[in-house]
Amino acid sequence: MGEPRPRWTLAPRELDEPHPSRLREDHPDRAEILARHTEALRDGTPGYLDPATGLFVLSAGFLARRGFCCTRGCRHCPYVT
């Protein structure tokens, strides 16, 4: 097996607070997105279905437990500063 990935440092914000570059304040579905994300964090599930597209979105909790940033632009990436 290969070497384990080093753990990244989390950004200095709460997991329920997305970086503004990943979810704008004026996003039309922001309230619903944040409600679904909060539910996923509370329940410990890996993510939720996006209200507009139906795509599965990973939660910040799941991404933080993973321990590194994949650099794919995740909406709730806990490593983006």
Image (tube, helix red, strand yellow):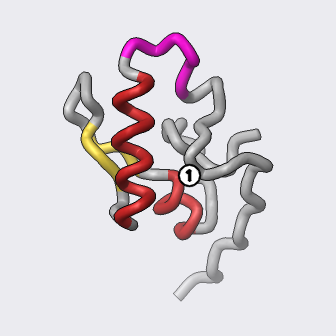
Residue at disc 1, secondary structure: loop
Q: Is residue 48 above or below residue 41?
A: above
Residue at image x 52%, y 88%?
Answer: 1
Q: Which residue is drawn at 36% across and 60% down?
A: 46
Residue range (magenta):
23-28
Magenta stretch secondary structure, dominant:
loop
Q: Does the magenta stretch include residue 27?
A: yes
Residue 26: in magenta span: yes
Measuring from the top left, give residue 30's x and y in whole percent.
44, 23
Residue 8 appears at what percent x and percent y? 73, 63
Please name the residue that numbered disc 1 is placed on: 70
Specify few, some or many for label 1: CA neighbours under 10 Å numbering under 14, 14-19, or 20 or more: few
Instruction: Name the residue: 64% across, 82% down.
Output: 3
Q: What residue type is labelled 1?
A: Cys
Please tell me in which quadrant of the rendered image residue 9 appears: bottom right
Q: Is residue 52 left or right of residue 44?
A: left
Report x, y in % for residue 63. Answer: 52, 58
